[in-house]
């Protein structure tokens, strides 16, 4: 097999996040230049036109329902303080917010395209208020219609344009839904409840008479439900084993798409509401890759655009005819000349953990080992741990993963307890005082790897980002003899300093998952890897962005410094123009070239 260098794999492009214009033009994000920018296509297979030319990543795009104009968002250097901009048909760009110290979270266009809504923490960094603004106004002219006292976001205008759907997040697993009258400011609470209940992916139904969403209010798994404006909940679709991840509903036609998460892959159902809780289903779209999301309905809801990916399929935008299920790829994001047939798909495996619980994982073997040529136990393994922790490792495309596989590494991606996708009870198995049980799952996963005939038990690497970075550091301190090396990307080293220094708007949400500084400080200290740094034996690579608002760069600095003082071989790389992750292609190439050399030296 022809060998390709790392930069080729990291140059594989992605096209995603699409939005239809009133005339059927498709806008989308694509990272051809090294960061995601706005592009457009009038038809499939055409030559795309680049619409924005920034050094920073464009985060979303949303076309007006009435004009050939769109709104997009962008922050500065990964600081997540997104600003909103309007791009006109003639290419002129207008800054709509202009408050760089505040976050702005898009809430959608009004039905007539004259106004838009958003949530922002410009009044108080720790909370989000709700604003409505005229399409041609500036940030100072936005109307504050609701003063929030928590994490609020906008789910869209009602079909009559008089109300807003508003969500409040108490934690990643606990939300509330409200209807907010724009003129009066009166707010109706639709979801009073006790305990933790998810109400997510909420959309207005036809005529604005109800809301459709997914919830686990009555089940261990997420179900598709109809929520009346009086707060009555009716289940529309459910699955006892798997979550219904989300729903995208066109409020004019009643057509919808919802997805079912089956072991990390998803299955789309397309249909049309024929009654409050009845759906006429259409043929299932034939899409590659096994993962599709980010649905954008076209004019008259005759078709929709969707981002499609898979471990063997780099991300591109497809357009699906709703009634027939016929699909067509519109974008042509490049594989950088690497043949698609060389990409390797994972196997879904399960292993028993310390308490007998079965833990799911994705396991990929390099070509040599998969063909049985490496059954003598010579294959090194990268244990790649997802962040969140309220997340799930799914088989989307990753150029870095494919590069490691091409270099002869196996890749093991566990969905330890606390991961989403396996029911409500599973997600809570790592809450607060049970935090380290998820690290025990890593130990059990390594035991499973030791029993695999292809694996070299002396060459197993822990790698992860964000919360996954904490898991790497915890694995290195709790089970120091298991690891040949660790790669910590924007990870948490000290839960106390992390919670003290994370963005004010995030602290309450994170404390709901990890524990409170006021009541759980001693426990948080006890599980922080920084306080057990003397137990690290394996060489450590620490990678971070200087502008990270979630896990401040001080986490990287303290673990690198103290591990080095213990005599551990440590390399640290910090990028001044990055935030929570390394997003710019030039930086990714530099960063992971250094990581690969580090692993070559130590593994």
Image (spheres, helix red, strand yellow):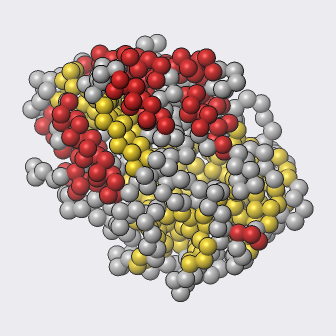
Percent x, y of residue 15 = 40, 63
409 w.r.t. 122: above or below: above
In terms of image quadrants, where is residue 67?
A: bottom right
What residue is rendered at 44% in x and 40% in y? 490
What residue is rendered at 41% in x and 20% in y? 533
Judging depth in this view, the residue of 584 and 450 nearest the camera is: 584
Percent x, y of residue 181 = 85, 60
Left or right: residue 573 versus residue 496 is left
236 w.r.t. 47: above or below: above
543 w.r.t. 304: above or below: above
In terms of image quadrants, where is residue 81?
A: bottom right
Judging depth in this view, the residue of 334 and 601 nearest the camera is: 601
> Residue 199: in sight, yes or no?
no
> Residue 143: in sight, yes or no?
yes
Percent x, y of residue 561 = 39, 30
Left or right: residue 96 versus residue 448 is right
Q: Quick one: which residue is furthest to the front in this view?
A: 565
Percent x, y of residue 82 = 58, 59
Left or right: residue 161 versus residue 17 is right
- Could you tell me how many numbered marks the image carries? 0
Left or right: residue 381 versus residue 561 is left
What residue is rendered at 81% in x and 38% in y? 192
Q: Quadrant of the C terminus?
A: top left
What residue is rendered at 61% in x and 43% in y? 503
11 w.r.t. 97: above or below: above
Q: Quick one: which residue is furthest to the top in this view?
A: 355
Judging depth in this view, the residue of 98 and 371 nearest the camera is: 98
In terms of image quadrants, where is residue 316?
A: bottom left
């Amino acid at each position: 097999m022809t060998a390709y260098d790392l930069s080729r794999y990291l140059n594989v492009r992605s096209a995603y996040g699409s939005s239809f214009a009133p005339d059927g033009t498709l806008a989308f994000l694509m990272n051809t230049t090294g960061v995601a920018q706005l592009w457009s296509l009038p038809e499939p297979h055409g030559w795309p036109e680049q619409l924005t030319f920034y050094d920073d990543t464009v985060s979303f795009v949303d076309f007006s329902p009435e004009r050939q104009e769109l709104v997009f968002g962008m922050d500065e250097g990964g600081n997540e303080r997104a600003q909103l901009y309007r791009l006109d048909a003639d290419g002129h760009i207008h800054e709509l917010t202009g408050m760089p110290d505040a976050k702005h979270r898009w809430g959608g266009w009004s039905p007539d395209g004259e106004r838009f809504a958003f949530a922002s923490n410009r009044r108080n960094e720790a909370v989000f208020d709700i604003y409505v603004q005229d399409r041609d106004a500036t940030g100072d002219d936005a109307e504050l219609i609701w003063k929030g006292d928590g994490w609020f976001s906008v789910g869209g205008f009602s079909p009559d344009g008089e109300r807003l759907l508003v969500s409040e997040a108490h934690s990643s697993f606990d939300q509330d839904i409200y209807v907010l009258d724009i003129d009066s400011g009166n707010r109706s609470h639709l979801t009073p409840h006790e305990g933790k209940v998810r109400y997510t992916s909420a959309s207005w139904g036809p005529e604005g008479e109800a809301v459709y969403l997914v919830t686990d209010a009555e089940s261990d798994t997420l179900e598709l439900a109809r929520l009346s404006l009086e707060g009555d909940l009716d289940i529309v679709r459910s699955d006892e084993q798997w979550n219904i991840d989300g729903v995208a509903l066109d409020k004019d036609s009643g057509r919808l798409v919802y997805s079912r998460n089956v072991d990390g892959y998803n299955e789309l159902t397309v249909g049309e509401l024929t009654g409050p809780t009845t759906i006429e289903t259409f043929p299932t779209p034939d899409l590659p890759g096994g993962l599709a999301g980010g649905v954008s309905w076209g004019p008259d809801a005759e078709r929709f655009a969707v981002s499609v990916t898979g471990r063997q399929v780099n991300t591109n935008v497809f357009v699906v005819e709703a009634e027939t299920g016929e699909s067509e790829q519109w974008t042509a994001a490049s594989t950088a000349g690497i043949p698609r047939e060389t990409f390797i798909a994972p196997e879904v495996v399960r292993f028993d953990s310390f308490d007998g619980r079965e833990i799911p994982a994705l396991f990929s073997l390099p070509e040599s080992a998969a063909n049985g040529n490496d059954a003598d136990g010579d294959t090194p393994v990268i244990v790649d741990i997802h962040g969140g922790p309220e997340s799930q490792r799914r088989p989307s495309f990753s150029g870095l993963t494919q590069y490691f596989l091409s270099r002869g590494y196996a890749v093991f991606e566990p969905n330890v307890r606390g991961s989403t996708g396996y029911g409500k009870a599973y997600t809570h198995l790592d809450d607060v005082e049970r935090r380290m049980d998820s690290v025990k799952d890593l130990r059990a996963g390594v035991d499973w790897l030791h029993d695999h005939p292809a694996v070299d038990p002396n060459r197993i690497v822990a790698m992860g980002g964000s919360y996954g970075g904490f898991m790497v550091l915890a694995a290195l301190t709790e089970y120091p003899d298991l690891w040949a090396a660790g790669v910590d990307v924007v990870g948490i080293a000290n839960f106390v300093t992390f919670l003290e220094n994370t963005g004010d708007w995030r602290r309450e949400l994170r404390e709901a998952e990890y524990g409170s500084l006021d009541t759980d400080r001693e426990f948080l200290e006890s599980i922080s890897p920084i306080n057990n740094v003397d137990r690290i034996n394996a060489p450590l690579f620490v990678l971070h962005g200087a502008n990270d608002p979630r896990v401040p760069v001080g986490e990287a600095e303290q673990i690198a410094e103290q591990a080095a003082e213990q005599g551990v071989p440590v390399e640290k790389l910090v990028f001044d123009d990055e935030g929570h992750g390394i997003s710019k292609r030039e930086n990714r190439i530099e960063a992971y070239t250094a990581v690969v050399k580090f692993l070559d030296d130590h593994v």
